[in-house]
Image (cartoon, rainbow, N blue to C red):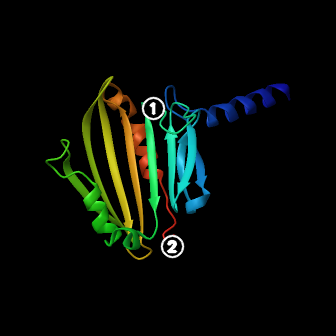
């Protein structure tokens, strides 16, 4: 009987363990915007709201106060009532915010539609104090609800290859409420 329990425990542990080096991701509800995202275990989430705009900072390093630097992470900015604020539809405003092919080395903007969301993605490198930084911007515009979700990922260029899979899992896991 004891052998059976040991085997069952080992099987259960093996089933929940992640492969060596692979980050454990946990679903994090973003209650203010009625959405969710996968958050790597050990990373930090900070939420701020200003004038109805909600900002989430998801970082590998702990952010104590506004302006604290971080090397790797994601900023999600959620702007409701875009037309009222900018006199532009969210999809037009998204294109206005994203770098073009000539700006900052952005290449090949990717445009997709996800239900009511028009999504635009651009990636590029910028120079930083500690070396080049990989930046990926994704703008998800809901012209029906007049909300813009703007995601900005950053990480050191030297870690780009090692972080690529994690970055893509996090970015693709962002799930906004289409009615928000």
Residue 8, image quadrant = top right
Say which residue appears at 44% left-offset and 71% top-offset: 81
> Where residue 144 appears, x then y in whole percent?
41, 77
Badge 1 or badge 2: first in the primary sequence: 1
- Who's the residue at 38% across and 46% down the image? 152
| Mark 1 Cα-neighbour bin, 10 Å: few <14, some 14–19, many ≥20 | few
Q: Quadrant of the N terminus?
A: top right
Q: Are marks 1 and 2 in contact (CB under 8 Å)?
A: no
Q: Which residue is mark 1?
A: 69
Residue 91, given in percent of the width and then of the height, sits at 31, 67
- Furthest toward the right, the residue is 1
Residue 79 pos. (x, y %): 45, 62
Q: Nearer the viewer, residue 135 or 130?
A: 130
Residue 110 falls in image quadrant:
bottom left
Asked whether the viewer can see residue 138, the reply is yes
Question: Callout 2: helix, strand or loop?
Answer: loop
């Amino acid at each position: 009987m004891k052998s059976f329990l040991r085997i069952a425990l080992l099987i259960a542990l093996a089933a929940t363990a992640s492969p060596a080096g692979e980050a454990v991701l946990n679903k994090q509800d973003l209650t203010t915007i009625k959405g969710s995202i996968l958050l790597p275990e050990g990373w930090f989430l900070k939420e701020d709201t200003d004038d109805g705009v909600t900002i989430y900072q998801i970082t590998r390093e702990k952010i104590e106060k506004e302006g604290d630097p971080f090397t790797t992470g994601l900023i999600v900015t959620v702007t409701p009532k875009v037309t009222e604020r900018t006199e532009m539809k969210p999809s037009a405003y998204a294109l206005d915010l994203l770098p073009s092919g000539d700006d900052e080395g952005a290449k090949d903007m990717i445009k997709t539609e996800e239900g009511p969301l028009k999504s635009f993605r651009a990636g590029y490198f910028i120079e930083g104090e500690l070396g080049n930084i990989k930046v990926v911007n994704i703008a998800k515009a809901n012209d029906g609800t007049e909300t813009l979700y703007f995601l900005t990922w950053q990480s050191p260029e030297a870690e780009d290859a090692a972080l690529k899979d994690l970055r893509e899992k996090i970015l693709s896991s962002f799930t906004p409420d289409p009615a928000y």
